Image (spheres, rainbow, N blue to C red):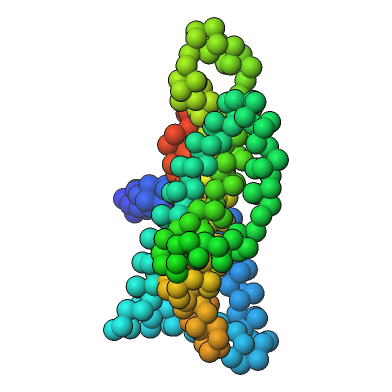
Amino acid sequence: MTSLKAWICNELGSLRDDLDWLWRVPLHVWLRLPVLLLVLLAWIWLSRILPNGFFAGPTLTVDAFFLMLADNRQDFLIALGTTVFVYLSGFLLAAVAGILLGALFGSIPLLSRTFAPFIHAVAALPVIALIPLIVLLLGLGWQAKVLIIALGAVMPVLVNTQTGVQSLDSDLREMAAAYNVSLTGRVRHFYLPAALPQIMAGLRLGAIAGLVTSVIADFYTAMTGLGALLQAYGNSFRMDRYLAVVLTYAAIGTVFTGLLSLLENRLSPPSRRRYLA
């Protein structure tokens, strides 16, 4: 009896050690599971109440996704690679330009006040209105798409970077002035580290805006990428494949913004890193 009790205690202890990782999973991760379940139930419900052909359920969408992956012509994989390449190129261009200009305008008040109305005007200008001009200048190729995506993503990065740099503590500004730190040194060692949360928020907003703009770019320029598949499947009412492409866009946005959050975690000081975690 004693040996049986000891065996049960050992097994329970081993089981507790094996499941110890469950207790280390953050609460918000567990809360995502019921949210995902509700989304799936709503998806299934819509597919049941809408007429056939108007909406595809999860099963048909997943089947269509794997059928596109297994297609010998590899249309989906080629379109995915094209979209990711153009999207990343446009976003990187927007990130570099937005951070540099935002840091410049934020660190020099005179420049900020001078260019403020022009920045607001450009931010309010819809990118779609510039597409005909961009097509005339660069044609219908990937170069035009990169520029369209960059224009769609740059303003959130620029404005957030400028706001973050301008919010730098006055004591740090006085210390930099007292030690006669150059403008380049102030931007590198004071402004950009202090503005990191705003910069990363701008990058995430720019990443989302750039992905949305990439769909518009596919519609109005050369019919390549996932946008071309989206239009083709939508026009032919192949809703299972249409939703598979839509979810692919959602997956790209989720993965990329998640990578930006990981980058922010790495670049942040330990105190803020614990808050982000």
In this view, which residue lies farthest toward the right?
117
In the image shown, does 162 or 23 lie closer to the viewer?
162
Give the percent coordinates (x, y) of residue 170: 64, 17
The residue nearer to you, when weighing 123 against 241, is 123
Left or right, residue 99 beside residue 117: left
**The residue positioned farthest toward the top in the image shown:** 178
The image position of residue 258, as x and y in percent, is 47, 51
Residue projecting furthest to the front: 136
Quick check: 271 above or below 90? above
State whether residue 91 is above or below residue 55.
above
Q: Position of residue 86 (x, y in %)?
A: 41, 61
Q: Is residue 197 visible?
A: no
- Residue at image coords 41%, 67%: 141
Going 51% across and 58% down the picture, which residue do you hit? 149
| Position above or below: 54 against 152 | below
Residue at 51 percent across and 38 percent down: it is: 99
Residue 176 visible here:
yes
The residue positioned 60% from the left and 84% from the top of the image is 55
Q: Residue furthest left?
A: 72
